[in-house]
Image (tube, rainbow, N blue to C red):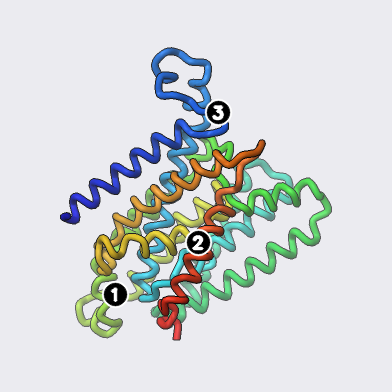
Amino acid sequence: MTRSARLALLTGLVAVLFSASLLAGKMWVTPLAWLNGDPLTPILLELRLPRALLGAMLGASLGLSGAVLQGFLRNPLADPAVLGVSSTAALGAVAAILLGVGSGGAFAAAMAGAAGAMVLLAVLAWRAAGPVAFVLVGTVLASLAGALTAFLIAVAPNPWAVAEVIDWLMGALTDRSWPDLARAAPAMVVGCALLLMTGRSLDALALGEEAARSLGVRMGRLQALVIVGTGLVVGAGVAATGVIGFVGLVVPHLLRPLFGARPAALLVPSALGGAALVLAADSLVRLVPGAGEVRLGVAMAMLGAPFFLALLWRGEGRTWR
């Protein structure tokens, strides 16, 4: 089967799962509701359609950023969380929630946290424009942001706000609406466009840094594209939905046997695969018996953690040494 045929099948899978996301839930809505003025139509238009669009964009952003980071760091276990952007975005949102601001304020605070992480990454890693410094700086940021988030939760005087923070940190698409999509979509689109510009440079980097430089790759420019692109998509995703992990780790590995290991060839399939994975997972969490929904971030962690351990068991983690 040709690459084009595989891409077409993957695109079709995304379309099917997007349609299923509109219909599935505690209350199923048939396609006829669109046509005959069914009272359930507002559920489709005001709740499930923006939720499905946001889920597809989030999955595509995380899948694409995961493929880019694995190519840039030349490490199959790299994940968007490695930059620390998601942790700092979460720190900003948690601070805003504890201060009692609205959803718009929490989104702005999360994006400000992501922007701060991008600036620190650029400043601290610029002198040594290479993967090692990139990982070290990201790890420090993630650890510091996680510690500060835990500190804010520990000293918060309002238990209701703490409960809201913990619920938000689990990550979910529940009750997301058109305003949430409108706030997140521009940053995700711009970030994905920047990440797609890294394809040829990542292919050259697969030969080694010295070989890449000899082929005309400017490591500083490539690093800037990776930092800003990942920061925008991850920051907007965390700001809109909370922390949802493992998509960027799992998807490139699932698709690499089908589309090859060349980084540039994996970017678009990873975006489509990420959209498919998030849409499928979000549909399934709605069908779990009970009054509420399992949080999407929890479901992805339950899927991603065993997958991560399986990679280590197979010896993929040797690239860390």
Above-or-below relation of 211 to 37: below
Circle 1: element type: loop
Quadrant the N terminus occupies: bottom left
**CB under 8 Å between discs 1 and 2:** no
Report how far apart the C-alphas of labels 3 and 1 lie in the structure.
53 Å
The structure residue drawn at horizontal position 28% and vertical position 76%, both measured from the top left corner, is 205
Position above or below: 128 against 299: below
Which residue has dot 1 on it? 218
Task: Answer left or right for 163 relative to 20.
Answer: right
Residue at numbered disc 3: 27
Q: Amino acid at mark 1?
A: Arg
Q: Which mark is residue 304?
A: 2
Looking at marks 2 and 3 on the same chain, the residue that comes earlier in the sequence is marked by: 3
Give the x, y percent position of residue 286: 55, 39
Identified at 36% across, 72% down, the residue is 72
Q: What is the secondary structure assignment of the residue under circle 2?
A: helix
Q: Closer to the camera, 245 or 148?
A: 245
